[in-house]
Image (spheres, rainbow, N blue to C red):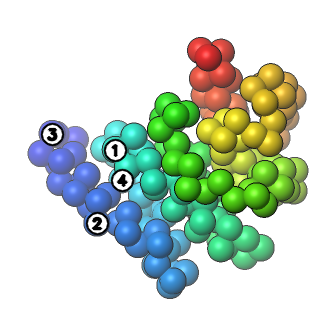
Amino acid sequence: MGPKESRELKLWVTEILPMLESADECLKFSACWALVWLADATSWSPQERPQVLSDLVRAWRSFEGKEWEYMPAWGIACLPLIPRDAYPKKDDEPELPGFIEKMVSARGPYQRAASYTLAYYRRGPWNDQELAERLESETGPGAFVSECKSRLLAALAQR
């Protein structure tokens, strides 16, 4: 893809981001799906708008228990990591650590990978050493979790 196409597609990303906050679940689901693919195609990073991570967390929590709950989790786990200090503090809800623990232990690969990613950003519910140990012992199926695990372990090693 050329630079012109990449710039044009990045404009679509900015148009899609507000849809993550829609009350319409179909629109929110579609925005998550489009964001992941456009971010991949254009090398878009949440560093450009860190708030997108909180938006994806809220979407994920609103989809909890539904067949499509994996979609925002996929977004959280797929987007490039940003510096931890850039992660928005807006999602500091008291029940979020329990949600992370529940999703990492009881759900599919996207939910597990997103849970580990959120734990990395939030530095909880596990400290860095505990998170690294959990990641090292992760034996879940699929290349997706392995890729996320490798990326997070590399980030933790750089701290």
**Amino acid type indicated by mark 4:** Leu
Dividing the picture into quarters, in which one does residue 151 lie?
Answer: top right
Give the CA separation, mark 2 to mark 3.
19 Å
Q: For the residue labelled by badge 2, is the local secondary structure a helix, a strand or a loop?
A: helix
Marks 3 and 1: which is nearer the front? 1
Direction from residue 85 to residue 109 in the image, left or right: right
**Which residue was labeled with disc 3?**
3
**Amino acid type indicated by mark 1:** Glu
Furthest-top residue in this view: 158
- Whichever of labels 4 and 1 marks the residue nearer the N terminus, that label is 4
**Circle on res. 95:** none
Q: Which quadrant: the N terminus?
A: top left
Direction from residue 113 to residue 8 in the image, left or right: left
- Whichever of labels 4 and 2 marks the residue nearer the N terminus, that label is 2
Q: For the residue labelled by badge 1, is the local secondary structure a helix, a strand or a loop?
A: helix
**Which residue was labeled with disc 4?**
38
Marks 2 and 3: which is nearer the front? 2
- Residue 10 position in % (x across, y down): 25, 52
Q: How many other residues sit within 10 Å of disc 3, few (<14), some (14-19) or many (≥20)? A: few
Give the CA separation, mark 1 to mark 2.
14 Å
Direction from residue 11 to residue 86 in the image, left or right: right
**Which residue was labeled with disc 2?**
15
- Whichever of labels 1 and 2 marks the residue nearer the N terminus, that label is 2
Marks 1 and 2: which is nearer the front? 1
Give the CA separation, mark 4 to mark 2.
11 Å
Dividing the picture into quarters, in which one does residue 93 lie?
Answer: bottom right
